[in-house]
Amino acid sequence: MLNAINFDDVIKLAKQAGAAIMEIYNRDFSVDMKADESPLTEADLASHHCIVDGLKKITPHIPVLSEESTTIAWQERSQWQSYWLIDPLDGTKEFIKRNGEFTVNIALIVEQQPVWGVVYAPAKALLYYGGQLHAGSVKESAEDKTAIHVKLLPESARGWKIVGSKSHQSDEFAQLVKRFDQPDIVNLGSSLKICMVAEGSADLYPRLGLTSEWDTAAAHAVLQGAGGEIYQADNLTPLRYNTKENLLNPFFHALGKTNDFNRLVKEYLA
């Protein structure tokens, strides 16, 4: 069943959603607030409808869970073996600021793992896709298309490039980076942070603040396809999806490769 999915059609769908977002991005738009005080724009909803309607045509047998349609009961959702998990507009705050650092995220989850994902940043004309079902991950820009791979992590406290959230920094993040020797810290919006680790332009993305499962799933798949992983910060086991009623992620670390994971954990992450 999964082998019959045409992922090229899903990539086209992400680009269509991105085009719908950019049409709104390039004109005046209003901003509403959701119950959790997070912002909502018409671009979020336009992208949501584009993706959900499209996925129902491409894979009518696979359920869809979106940030903008989270009312599906846990009793039903807990029975899913596979489903699409989408964030129609990841980085709404960056969209509102018009800094271009927002993405369309579509992930396929199978047995609690992200096995394929696409991350599209329409304002930057950047596309990432891949995962376990793709035998690798790819980055496409206006200039080229190339396979991507994570970096081998530094073996000492020096030479680290750490990416942090542009809109959601935390005291825990500030304390963590003190363990490194003059790290190069880059602040960026949306799931592009995980993609930086996947393409080897960053070593570590420690998210020591709240996120939801749709925020990470697509980029997590891309990271796995590039040879990296996301680990829960409390027990350093791989991040999993649809394991509980609420859809919040634990704090986590997105990492490249290391030759000594136990030492890495002991010296920097524990």
Image: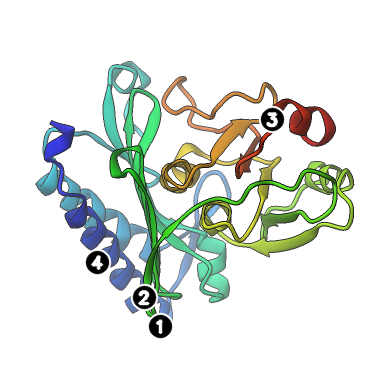
Which of marks 3 and 1 precedes in the sequence?
A: 1
Looking at the picture, which amino acid does disc 1 mark?
Asn
Drawn side of residue 126 relative to residue 6, left or right: right
Which of marks 2 and 3 precedes in the sequence?
A: 2
Quadrant in which residue 229 is drawn: top right
Which of marks 4 and 3 precedes in the sequence?
A: 4
Tag count in the figure? 4
The foreground one among 265 and 205 is: 265
Looking at the picture, which amino acid does disc 3 mark?
Phe
Element on which disc 4 rests: helix
The Cα atoms of the two marked residues, 3 and 4, are separated by 40 Å
Which of marks 2 and 4 precedes in the sequence?
A: 4
- In percent of the image, x 29 and y 60: which residue is there? 14
Drawn side of residue 42 relative to residue 240, left or right: left
Dots 1 and 4: beta carbons under 8 Å? no
Q: Give the labeled residue for mark 4.
A: 16
- In percent of the image, x 81 and y 36: which residue is there? 268
Dots 4 and 2: beta carbons under 8 Å? no
Front label number (1 vs 4): 4
Location of the C terminus by quadrant is: top right
Front label number (3 vs 4): 3
Drawn side of residue 258 relative to residue 88, left or right: right
Q: Give the labeled residue for mark 1.
A: 26
**Position in image of residue 105 (x %, y %):** 39, 52
Mark 3: give few (<14), some (14-19) or many (20+) Cα within 10 Å: few
Q: Give the labeled residue for mark 3.
A: 261
Front label number (1 vs 3): 3
The Cα atoms of the two marked residues, 4 and 2, are separated by 10 Å
The Cα atoms of the two marked residues, 2 and 1, are separated by 6 Å
- Residue 22 is marked as 2
